[in-house]
Amino acid sequence: MSNSSPKIVICGAGMAGLSAAYHLVVKQKQKNVTIIDELNPLSLTSDKGTQAYRNWWPGPDDTMVKFINRSIDLIDELALENNNFFNLNRRGYLFLTAEQTHLAQWKKSALEISKLGTGDFREHTQENSYLSTITSSFDKNLTGADLILNPEIITKKYPFLTKNIVGGLHVRRAGWMESVKLGHWLKDEVIKAGTKILLDKLESVKIINNSISSIKLSSGKVLDIDILVLAVGPHLKATGRLLGLDLPVFNELHGKITLSDTANTFSSEAPLMIWDDPLYLPWEKDQIDLFNKDASTQRLLEKFPTGVHLRPKGDKNNLELMIIWTYEHKTQDEFSPISFDPYYKEILIRGLSKMIPKLSSYFGKSDKAYLDGGYYCKTPENRPLIGPLPINGAYIIGALSGYGIMASQAAGELLAAHIAGSKLPDYTSNFLLERYKDANYQTLVQNINSLAGQL
């Protein structure tokens, strides 16, 4: 660093970059911070997700639970201090099944995850022992999970669900928010504190004696800097190469559809609901005959994996369904224009009809749904990269996969602590790039993969 107030450039104005800037400028009182992005803030991937969050993460250790719990703590604080302007709720995630064997599997995994710090595990056979979904605001003390062994408890509250349900698992420290509102608030706060945002693109990085010296932008500007933070989301692989680094990340395509619920199939007061059973899509006979004639469409008749889910958007007078399902994992190293399966919208609606039968009223009408999405940038074990890189003055906050919104505040806080020299949390080492050289870490994560903790 050239002085006590280093010149810092954050490359990327998504939720990760803005959160890093907020914790650097507002919390750590750093000066001389500039954010650069070739796109408008929050417009690449940060506004494409479900805007949901949960502290429900599998092991093998408590790293991700601690990390996400800390981030939710910080998000709660922002909501409480600012009149919950971004409409944070704690409705939870409700996993549902029609397979009896899932109940024992859920109990086993829930007990394991509970011990990692997610909160108490509870079982319910009677309605009066189960706390229903809270819709008015959020209870920051609501944690743990409820295993509901009496399906009537669920179908009484949500009569639109299939009567084939045998039980549910309601994860409680979970819900969603209007994260774009939160992101723009973070942006406004850092601008008020003196941060500049440049609509420009990083073109090259000058490194002298293994230290960041300057950067050149597409506009031709050259900035002498002390610190460069990579917060570029799915552009991380290519941006890393500008520093001569081959970062261990790849991109995975994810999409969602939004559909106006004109047929009143759902409830504006529902939690995020997940169908946890594999399924066959319900096609008509003529469609089955047609798909069988073409090798490229025969896959539509095969069994699809678990995980189709939705949440409500809007109120009962203007309700939309936000439906998400990554039934196949398309991965690539580089960012490229996004292209989805031409049957994607119809597949999501038909898959979800296994949980909500009335959705059949939308069969063949998927053209009414709005489709968007983006790339998850991921590491092999689906944990983020946060901290210093092998070049002095270079830092990373990335590979936040599909949990970038929920992890953003703890990620920004951790990145800022690295730069400011503040106290670091005990999960810090598990997010460093150098963890891949640690034999103990490799042993720890050898049995988890890029789908770990992913819905």
Image: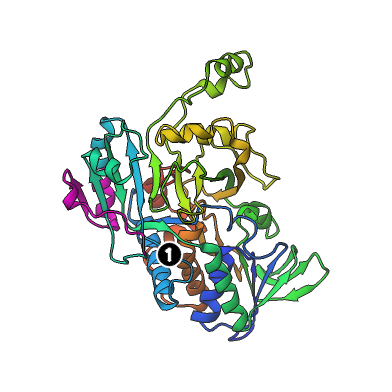
Q: From this view, report whether residue 220 is shown above or below residue 435.
A: below
- Residue 211 figure quarter: bottom right
Q: From this view, report whether residue 282 is shown above or below residue 31.
A: above
Q: Kindly tell me whether residue 191 is visible in this rendering.
A: yes
Q: Left of 52 or right of it: where is 152?
A: left
Tally the marks.
Answer: 1
Q: Left of 72 or right of it: where is 102?
A: left
| Residue type pointed to by label 1 | Leu
Residue at 47 percent across and 35 percent down: it is: 359
Q: Residue 344 location in percent, x, y?
A: 58, 35
Q: From this view, report whether residue 123 is shown above or below residue 220.
A: above
Task: Look at the image and say whether residue 452 sits in the magenta stretch.
Answer: no
Q: Residue 371 location in percent, x, y?
A: 61, 44
Taking depth in this image into account, of 206 and 383 the one nearest to the observer is 383
Q: From this view, report whether residue 254 is shown above or below residue 235.
A: above
- Residue 370 figure quarter: top right
Of the 4 image quadrants, the one containing the C terminus is: top left
Q: Kindly tell me whether residue 396 is visible in this rendering.
A: no
Which color scheme did the rendering employ for the protein? rainbow
Residue assigned mark 1: 88
Q: Left of 129 or right of it: where is 419?
A: right
Task: Look at the image and say whether residue 125 sits in the magenta stretch.
Answer: yes
Q: Residue 19 location in percent, x, y?
A: 53, 69
Residue at 48 percent across and 24 percent down: it is: 282
Within 10 Å of disc 1 (Cα), the crowding (few <14, some 14-19, many 20+) is: many
Of the 4 image quadrants, the one containing the N terminus is: bottom right
The boundaries of the magenta stretch are 108-136
Taking depth in this image into account, of 225 and 256 the one nearest to the observer is 256
